[in-house]
Image: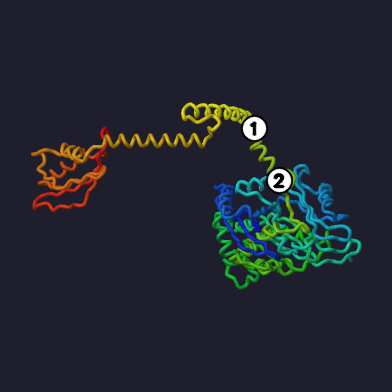
């Protein structure tokens, strides 16, 4: 089975193709499709055109597609529940998140990810997303010509590269048995174009997911304002020359100014990130040990060193292809960073029931119920008409069978009577084989009679010769000599010569009139015309029967 993860961002579309094997998986393809930065273009149409073309390459029966919601549209909180049964967890999260949601429960879809079992209970990451956002993703997928197997989140996709997703959730101590000491925690930063995601791990387990409304666009905007560039030009400057200087003593004035411009934009990000870190540090008793960078925005030169200097913990770029068991995709360092979420979403589609995937396609968006509802709405009236037509057809068949039986009996009686009166076959001996034999004999007699009539009406060779002679022009229209005439069945052949080409043409037209179908063919010349003469040899069909 092939699982395709689709990460649709504001700057580009990332697609990853992962194939499951008997024991593991293989990353087959990783692709990025940049989107136009022209604000006058409809980005949704561009996305649909790109994905529809791509999905046409796949066998939809053997491929499953996983789409995602951006974390800015999802609320997530870590909760501790006194039970571990999944059906109880699913029912509990709605009441647990009641005071946490910035939108109505009736307008939300809920899901939960069990991050670990703790004694008889479980720690879960409860999530909720607005129905409208889920509907947008489902409609987009259908516009692209596919039905999504799952609708997860970008953060859950990224998490699959840091978690043992193929195994059941790990077992841990109950909260009352844990020693209340600070836990070593790691940060994973996914820097996007418009927003960034923060994932927090403690003891190798995902504890929090947060969204920061800041991305590479903020740095590009700062460059654009400073150097009076439009957004497209500013993005090119950022991608081609973007950097921050850790030590400004060795740089030129222009380099220092450029670095300070980007640092001013980075200050907003580091400020919000610091607040998130302080909140989680106090809430979960964490001690930060290191950070990982991924996403297109993390390619800023010296970005990791800048964050290391700012937060006093090491930050490094994440090399995802080193953690996969097998990779056959051809990818660049850029693709390795930007495609993490897409690869993780593809892996989300390979999860097993013991550690199921996060899926917001449920309730009114559940694949089976939605399919039946749409099909009935679209074809219900036609199905009713088909049912009525089926009943009418059955009734007609019964009536027709009765009539056919009655007609068969009547026709058998008539056949026996006619066989006796016309063919002289006794009624008891009249059967289809005897009657067919009688008819066959009569047809042979009729064919023999018609053949005899044709022989009587057959034109002789002299009759045909007279017709040819009558059709040929008399002198002085054409001075010609006929040297050879051959008549075989319905084919005649005439050979001779004339004085010049004009007379030759006159003869040719005359012979065309003598032909029964008006057509003549060139024949092999069997005579040698005298010097100065133009020879001709033509073959054509003639009518051997009187009256045509």
User: Looking at the image, which is closer to me, 431 or 242?
Assistant: 431
Q: In which quarter of the image is residue 465?
A: top left
Viewer can see residue 268:
no
Q: Indicate the position of residue 187 as horizontal and vertical percent values.
A: 74, 64
The secondary structure type at the circle numbered 2 is: helix
Q: Position of residue 19 (x, y in %)?
A: 65, 61
Q: Position of residue 526 (x, y in %)?
A: 17, 52
- Viewer can see residue 414: yes
* Farthest residue, direction right: 176
Q: Do the residues labelled 1 and 2 touch (CB within 8 Å)?
A: no
Q: Residue 305, relative to residue 68: is it above or below? A: below
Q: Mark 1 points at which residue?
A: 394
Q: How far apart are marks 1 and 2 (CA)?
A: 32 Å
SS label for mark 1: helix
Q: Residue 210 carries which label?
A: none
Q: Which of marks 1 and 2 is nearer the N terminus?
A: 2
Name the residue located 72 percent from the left edge and 61 percent from the top edge: 160
| Quarter in which the N terminus is drawn | bottom right
Horizontal side of 472 relative to 426 (left or right) equals left
The nearer-to-camera label among 1 and 2 is 1
Picture residue at 71% right of the left edge, 50% below the top: 73
Q: Dot 2: within a 10 Å radius of its alpha carbon, few (fewer than 14), some, or many (20 or more) residues?
A: few
**In the image, residue 410 lies at what x, y percent?**
57, 26
Q: Nearer the viewer, residue 245 or 114?
A: 114
Q: Which colour scheme is used?
A: rainbow
Q: Which mark is residue 368?
A: 2
């Amino acid at each position: 089975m092939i699982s395709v993860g689709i990460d649709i961002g504001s700057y580009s579309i990332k697609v990853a193709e992962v194939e499951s094997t008997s024991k593991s998986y293989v990353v087959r393809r990783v692709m990025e499709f940049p989107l136009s930065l022209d604000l006058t273009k409809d980005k949704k149409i561009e996305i649909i055109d790109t994905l529809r073309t791509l999905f046409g390459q796949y066998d939809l029966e053997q491929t499953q597609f996983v789409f995602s919601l951006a974390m800015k549209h999802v609320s997530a909180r870590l909760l501790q529940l006194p039970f571990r049964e999944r059906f109880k967890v699913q029912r509990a999260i709605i009441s647990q998140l009641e005071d946490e949601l910035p939108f109505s429960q009736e307008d939300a879809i809920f899901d939960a990810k069990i991050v670990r079992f703790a004694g008889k209970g479980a720690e879960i990451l409860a999530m909720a997303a607005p129905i409208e956002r889920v509907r947008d993703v489902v409609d987009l997928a259908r516009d692209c010509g596919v039905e999504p197997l799952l609708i997860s989140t970008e953060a859950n996709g990224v998490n699959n590269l840091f978690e043992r997703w193929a195994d059941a959730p790990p077992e841990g101590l109950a909260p009352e048995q844990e020693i209340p000491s600070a836990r070593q925690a790691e940060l994973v930063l996914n820097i996007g174009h418009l927003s960034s995601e923060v994932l927090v791990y403690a003891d190798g387990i995902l504890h929090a997911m947060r969204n920061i409304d800041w991305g590479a666009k903020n740095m590009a905007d700062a460059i654009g304002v400073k150097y009076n560039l439009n957004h497209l030009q500013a993005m090119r400057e950022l991608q081609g020359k973007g950097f921050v200087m850790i030590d400004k003593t060795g740089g030129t004035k222009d380099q220092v100014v450029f670095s300070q411009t980007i640092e001013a934009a980075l200050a907003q990000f580091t400020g919000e990130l610091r607040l998130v870190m302080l909140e989680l540090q106090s809430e979960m008793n964490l001690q930060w040990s290191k950070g990982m960078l991924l996403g297109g925005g993390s390619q800023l030169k010296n970005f990791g060193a800048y964050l290391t200097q700012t937060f006093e913990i090491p930050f490094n770029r994440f090399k995802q292809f080193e953690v996969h068991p097998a990779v056959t995709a051809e990818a660049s360092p850029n693709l390795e960073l930007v495609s993490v979420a897409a690869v993780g979403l593809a892996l989300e589609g390979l999860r097993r029931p013991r550690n199921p995937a996060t899926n917001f396609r449920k309730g009114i968006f559940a694949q089976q119920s939605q399919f039946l509802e749409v099909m009935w709405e679209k074809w219900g009236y036609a199905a009713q008409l088909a049912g009525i037509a089926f009943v009418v057809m059955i009734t007609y068949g019964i009536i027709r069978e009765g009539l056919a039986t009655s007609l068969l009996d009547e026709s058998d009686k008539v056949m026996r009577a006619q066989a006796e009166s016309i063919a002289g076959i006794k009624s008891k001996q009249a059967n289809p084989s005897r009657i067919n034999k009688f008819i066959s004999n009569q047809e042979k007699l009729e064919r023999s009679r018609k053949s005899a009539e044709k022989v009587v009406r057959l034109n002789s060779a002299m009759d045909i010769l007279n017709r040819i002679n009558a059709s040929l022009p008399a002198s002085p229209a054409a001075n010609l000599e006929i040297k050879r005439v051959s008549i075989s069945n319905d084919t005649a052949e005439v050979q001779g010569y004339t004085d010049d080409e004009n007379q030759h043409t006159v003869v040719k037209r005359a012979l065309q009139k003598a032909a029964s179908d008006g057509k003549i063919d060139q024949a092999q010349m069997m005579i040698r015309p005298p010097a100065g003469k133009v020879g001709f040899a033509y073959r054509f069909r003639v009518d051997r029967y009187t009256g045509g």
